[in-house]
Image (cartoon, rainbow, N blue to C red):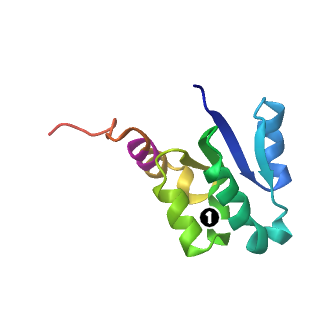
Amino acid sequence: MSQEIAVVGSPEFTTGFRLAGVRAFENVPDEEKDEALDDAVERTLDDGDVGIIVMHDDDLDHLSRGTREAVEGSIEPVLVTLGGSGAGSGGLRDQIKRAIGIDLMEEDD
């Protein structure tokens, strides 16, 4: 069974992914993020067809503590953040390690 990529965020953020063929998305306008982002993320987490959730790193600040812990701790679907401070090599490295369970960039001493 193949799983989908889902994108959650502002319409401006999701549009590029939709044009690239991503069909699962949740649009949450910037002015509604504090009220509506938790629900959008939770719906996406509960969707059994989704294997990867893509969000902008800055949007994590709009999530409640419980939703943020749920999405960051989720193995399937796995969260991938883009932009902001999470886009650096350390953030991506941690995301890959969490997704597959090993550190591919670990250096041997």
In which quarter of the view is residue 96 placed?
Answer: top left
At a point 67% along the width and 71% down the height, the residue shown is 62
Helix, strand or loop: magenta stretch: helix
> As rendered, which of 42 and 17 lies closer to the eye?
42
> As rendered, which of 35 and 16 lies closer to the eye?
35
| Residue 11 is one of the magenta-drawn residues | no
Left of 55 or right of it: where is 20? right
* Disc 1 residue crowd, few under 14, some 14–19, many 20+, Cα 10 Å: some
Which percent across, then down, holds residue 23? 78, 35
Eyeballing the image, is 63 above or below 96? below
Eyeballing the image, is 67 above or below 84? below
At a point 34% along the width and 35% down the height, the residue shown is 104
At a point 78% along the width and 30% down the height, the residue shown is 20
Eyeballing the image, is 42 above or below 52? below
Q: Residue furthest top?
A: 1
In which quarter of the view is residue 59 placed?
Answer: bottom right
| Residue 96 is one of the magenta-drawn residues | yes
Give the position of the N terminus as an image quadrant. top right
Give the position of the C terminus as an image quadrant. top left
Left of 67 or right of it: where is 35? right
For the magenta stretch, what is the residue range? 94-98
Q: Which residue is mark 1?
A: 60
Which percent across, then down, holds residue 37? 73, 65
Which percent across, then down, holds residue 98? 40, 47
> As rendered, which of 104 and 64 lies closer to the eye?
64
Q: Which amino acid type is shown beneath numbered disc 1?
A: Leu
At a point 85% along the width and 52% down the height, the residue shown is 11
Residue 53 visible in the shown view: yes
Which percent across, then down, holds residue 27? 82, 54
